[in-house]
Amino acid sequence: ELLIEKRHDYDRAIYDKIKMDWISCEKNYDIYRAKISVKEYGHYYYSFIFDDKKFQDYELLIYDEGYSTPNWVKGGIIYHIFVDRFFRRKIRVKKDVIIRKWGETPQYLPDEKGQVLNNDFFGGNLDGIEEKLPYIASLGVSIIYLSPIFEAYSNHKYDTGDYHKIDPMFGTETSLKRLISEAKKYGINVILDGVFSHTGDDSIYFNKYGRYNSTGAYESKDSPYYHWYTFNNWNNDYISWWGIKTLPEINENNSSYLDFITGEKGVLNHWQKTGVMGWRLDVADELPDEFIEKLRGSVKSYNKDALIIGEVWEDASNKYSYDKLKKYLCGKQLDSVTNYPLRDGIIDYVKNKDCTLLYNIMNKIMETYPSHTVNCLMNVLGTHDTERILTILGSESIPSSKSEMAESELSEAELKQGCMMLKIAVLLQMTLPGIPCIYYGDEAGMEGWKDPFNRKCYPWGYENKDILDYYIFITKLRKTNKVFAEGKYKCLIHDKGVFVFQRYDENEKIIIAVNLSQKGITLKLKEDMIEYTSNKKDNIFNIEKEDFIVLLKNLES
């Protein structure tokens, strides 16, 4: 029998029990089959019962039959820009900020009050990004993902001050419209970072310091924004994001706030009218299901092809958050998530020379995520929240203090080893299912531990040419082979340091073979294929240790 159980947060209930029909006997195995039908999307388990004994549970994610994700995204490449640190043109200055020389170390030491205010700026702006569009396009980029650009006190802008205004340091709404228009000429769309779980305390809505011409929730219980926040004891005792008092937490399901963000005249529509093609939702696991569903309805009603990516660090198919089983991928919430599990698998493989974790993660993704989601997963190696990928791969030790991190730099030997591992990591990122996301400067060999050292200025004129040339080479491979858009995935070999897989569809097949073992290997195939760089055609290929090959076959010819 086939047992189907419906999951409800931490509980489960029997949904159906179905008798299975015997079909055949193959290689001494009896083959049984059953057809199931469920009436509602959600999380299920299925298991088999034989002689009244129940065997292993398997996860089954059922998504809404109307679920789809934007086709224009698939096969693309995302470029993630931390705006203040990318490139500056016509620098703008506002009050209460520190302007630093391009390339200096960001402020990391606390002031006399023990605070790190994150108010040091280097002048990167939207005009600067526009000027560098030819460079971005040379990497095969199809999507620019901007870190938050709305007015805020800090350099990172995750402390929103005004959702309807571009921060003056970055430009104006006209600057954004011009960037979007110019980017489209290169086949590039722009998506924004939506921070809807909290605002800044220095904002129109909270106005703790009285800098805005508004009545904020901190100033009066009669404020139109008062019920957006939760006060234990008004006005100094309020709920804040992870206890950070500069980030008062929002009640996302408050009707006034919901309308402000998702309504016809709301924040989402305002910016999508400028040509913005989607959103990355900050801390998606802290947003209520009802809010995300309302957000999706608003975004898709304005433009059904807009992209919605959620910041999720774990397995998004069965994520629990605040004692709730999340429904991210059931068709009513997200198109995609930040694929941090894949990052973990790739790093573990290239550093430890064992592909077991990567193999298991890929199996889990392919088995439980909807194919609509798989093809637009945001595959990251580094972000503004992680160490630089070259640093994490090359470093033999981790500094114990921020002062040590500030001075840390890879040795010549570490850099050589790190570059080798980075090339393998990027190859996997660019060829496994999903959309690779390049964190600005990774392609230039930027180093750095966690915030703020992973947010340094792009080293214009001082790029690591070997790494940059490799990125251009490997992104060209991706862009010129359509199989990476929606082609199927199959692992052929997973044996410690050796990982071989293929992407294929009815027209094309590509094999990626990586050898991180301590000796060369010989790969024997059943058919001739062409090696990507040498154009050698054969069915036997030698792969040196710590190396890889890419093999292609056109199935139409």
Image: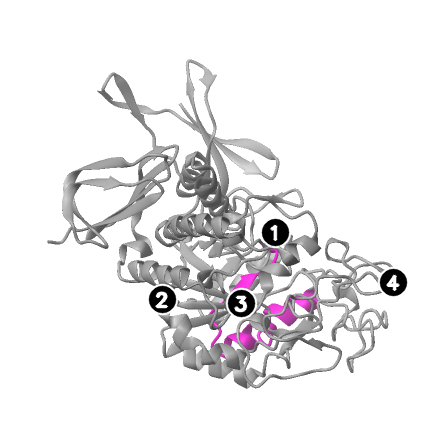
| Residue matched to label 3 | 298
Give percent across and percent down for residue 349. Answer: 44, 40
From the viewer's perspective, tell me whether residue 392 is left or right of residue 366.
right
From the viewer's perspective, tell me whether residue 110 is left or right of residue 163.
right
| Residue nearest the viewer, comparing 42 with 431 | 431
- Badge 2 or badge 4: first in the primary sequence: 2
| Residue matched to label 4 | 236
- Badge 3 or badge 4: first in the primary sequence: 4
Q: CA distance from mark 1 to mark 2?
A: 31 Å
| Residue matched to label 2 | 140
- Badge 3 or badge 1: first in the primary sequence: 1
Q: CA distance from mark 1 to mark 4?
A: 27 Å
Q: Amino acid at mark 1?
A: Asp
Which tag is nearer the camera, tag 3 or tag 4? 4
Q: Amino acid at mark 4?
A: Asn
Secondary structure under the numbered disc 4 in the rendered image: loop
- Rate crowding at label 2 as few (under 14), some (14 to 19) or many (20 or more) other CA atoms within 10 Å: many
Query: From what the image shows, is residue 210 above or below residue 334?
Result: below
- Rate crowding at label 1 as few (under 14), some (14 to 19) or many (20 or more) other CA atoms within 10 Å: many
Q: Amino acid at mark 2?
A: Gly
Specify the quadrant of the image occupied by residue 254: bottom right
| Residue matched to label 1 | 285
